[in-house]
Amino acid sequence: MPDAIDKAWVVCLEIKRIQTWLFSVPKLQPMVGANAILAKLMEKTLPHLAVAKGAALPVADRTCGEKAPAWIAGDHLASWDDPLNKKTDPILVRQAGRFHAVFVTEDAAKQFARAAAQAIGDACGDVRVQCEIEALECRSGAWRCTGKVAIAEVAISGGGNAVFESSLLQPCEASGLGVAAHRVGGRNGARKLRVSADVIRRQNAFGDHEAAKGEDCDLVKRFYQGVNKLGGYRQPNDFSDLADGGYLAVLCADGNGVGAGRADAEGNKDDDYFARWRRTEAYFLRTRSRIRAALATALADTKGLINKKETLVRYRMLMLGGDDILLVCRADRVLELASKLSQALDAINASGEASASTTIGIGIAIVHPKFPFRRAHELAEALMASAKKRSRSQTCVDWEVVTAAALPDLQALRHAQWVTGGDAGVAAIASLRPYPGHVLAQMVEKAQKLVPEEVGADLDRGARIGRGQWRRLAEQTLRGMFLGELAKRELRPTARTEIDAAVKAVANIWAGAPQPPKPHGTCDHWYPIGAADAPVAWGTPLLDLIEVAHIHTLGSRGVAHDDLQAEETEAGKGAAVGGALGDTPDQVGAA
C-alpha cells in the first residue's frame, strides 16, 4: 500500500441475539438451514460485498511480520480457518455473528455499513444489527484507534410480528412469525402447514447445505466430514429419528475465562492496532482450534453415535463458532460424549503451553424428542452456567433429565428435591453435580455395569436390581441419608456390593483422596462437602449414578432387563423420583 495512507476505518458489525434467530423455527431442518444461511453470509456474502465496496488494508502485512503459530493436531479445519497466514486480507473478524472489515476511506466504510445491513436483512429477516466504525490513525509508525462512530442498533425487518386480521394473512404455523404465504408438507396424508417465506428460505438452505460439496461446504459440514471421514454418512433430519427411539440430548458448551484471556492477549491498548489484533486473533484461534480437535476426537470415540453398518450418525451440529458448541444427539450417549470431550481437551492442553489451558463448561438437557426445543436449549444453557460456576480451571459437566411436560425453575426444583435432613443439623444434598469431566467418565463406566444395555446369559442374577427397587432406593435417599441406607440394605448382598463399589469409585475421584468415616459409620454412600472434620453438608453421588444408569431405558426402547417391571414394589408405584425414573414418554407434552 502507498506510504501516504495514514488513516483507516474499521466497520464492526454484530448480529444481536443470534441464537434467538437461529432457533426461532423449532424444527431440526430449519435450524440446520439457518446455520447454513449465517455461514454463507459470514464466509461469502459479506466478504465479497466488502471487497466490492473497496475494503483494503493500510499496511502491507496485518500480522506485523509475526510467524503464525503451529496448527493444533487433530483440528482438520486448521488449514481452512487460518487467519494468521493471510497477511493482506482486509477482513479481520468473521466469527459467531461478528464481522469486521478495514477501509482506507471513511466514505467507503459508511457505504459498506449500509449495504451490509441490507444484505443481513435479506439473508436473515428480522434481526437487530449493532454497527460502529472505528477510526484509525498512524502515529509514529503505529496504528491507533482515535475514536468510534457509534451507530445505534439497526432493526432490520423481514416481515416481523404482526396481528393478522385478514383470513388471507395468517401467521406462520411453524414459528408464529411472519405471514404464512406458503404451504408445505402433506406427505403420507399429513396436513399441509402454512408457513412464512423465512421458513421456506431456511428449508431451501438446508437442502443446499446437504448437497454442498468441496469449496461450497460451510464450517459445520467441513467439520462433520472430517470426523472419521464421514462424508458419505447420513444424518437424521428430525429430532425423533435422531433420538432413535429414546430421548434427545441438547449439549451446550462454552469456553471458560475467554473474556479475561482476550484482555490478557490483547495487552496494552496503546500498542499498534494490528499488533493487538494479531495477539487477540492468535488467542481466539488457539481456543477454537483446541475445542474443535477435542470434539472431533470425542465424536469419533463415542460408541453408538456412528453406525458404520447403516452409514448413519446420530448427532447434528447446530453451532460451532468460536468457543461455542451446540449439538443434539441420542441421549444414552451424551454423557459418555461429554466425558470424552473433557478428556480429549485435557490431553491437548497437556501437550501445549501449561499456562494457556483451554477448558469449557458443558450443560446437557435430556428431554423427549417432542419437548419444545427452545425450552430445552434454555435449560442446557442454564446447566452450562452451573458447570462453569463449579470451576473455570477444569472442564465440568452438569445435566438434567426432564420427563414432565413442563419445565420448572431449575434451582428451585433442585433445592426442593435434593436438600434433605442430614446428621447433627448438617444438610444432606442428594447429588454432587456438576462433575469434573474425569469424574463423569468414571461415573459413566460404573453406571453401565449397574444397568447394562445388554444382559449376558452368564450374568449373576443376584446382582440384578429391579426397577421398583431402584425407585424405592431413590425415594428413600431423597427423604434422608439414614432412610436411604436402610433401603440399600434391603437389596441382595451382591447388588449392595456393586452399588457400594460404584459409589466409592466415583466419590474418591471426586474428592481426590480416600474419604473419611461417614456419619455414625453407617451411611456408606454419603461424603462430607467442605472440611472433613466440620462439613458444611453431606453429599452423595448415588442418585446421579442411578439416573445415568437408566438414561438408556427412557423412551420406546424399553428397559434393559425383562424382570424389572415385574419387581416393582408398592412403595415405588406412582412416585416421581429423579429424571431417569420419572414419568413415561406418553406423559410428555408435544411441542
Image (cartoon, rainbow, N blue to C red):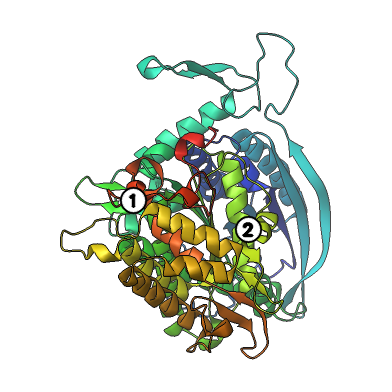
Q: Quadrant of the N terminus?
A: bottom right
Other-residue count near label 2 (Cα within 10 Å), few / some / many at <14 / 14–19 / ≥20: some
Whole-angstrom CA distance, mark 2 to mark 1, is 25 Å
Which element is circle 1 on? loop
Q: Quadrant of the C terminus?
A: top right
Judge whether 208 appears above or below 288 on screen: above
Residue tagged 1:
564
Judge whether 97 appears above or below 460 on screen: above
**Which residue occupies the foreground of this view, 198 or 273?**
198
Residue at 72% in and 68% down: 4
**Which residue occupies the foreground of this view, 32 or 249?**
249
**Which residue occupies the foreground of this view, 426 or 228?**
426
Residue at 69% in and 41% down: 117
Residues marked 2 and 1 touching at CB (< 8 Å): no
**Which residue occupies the foreground of this view, 469 or 206?**
469
Residue tagged 2:
417
Residue 303 percent location from the top left of the image:
30, 59
Residue 275 percent location from the top left of the image:
65, 76
Other-residue count near label 1 (Cα within 10 Å), few / some / many at <14 / 14–19 / ≥20: some
Observer able to see residue 96: no
Q: Which mark is residue 511?
A: none
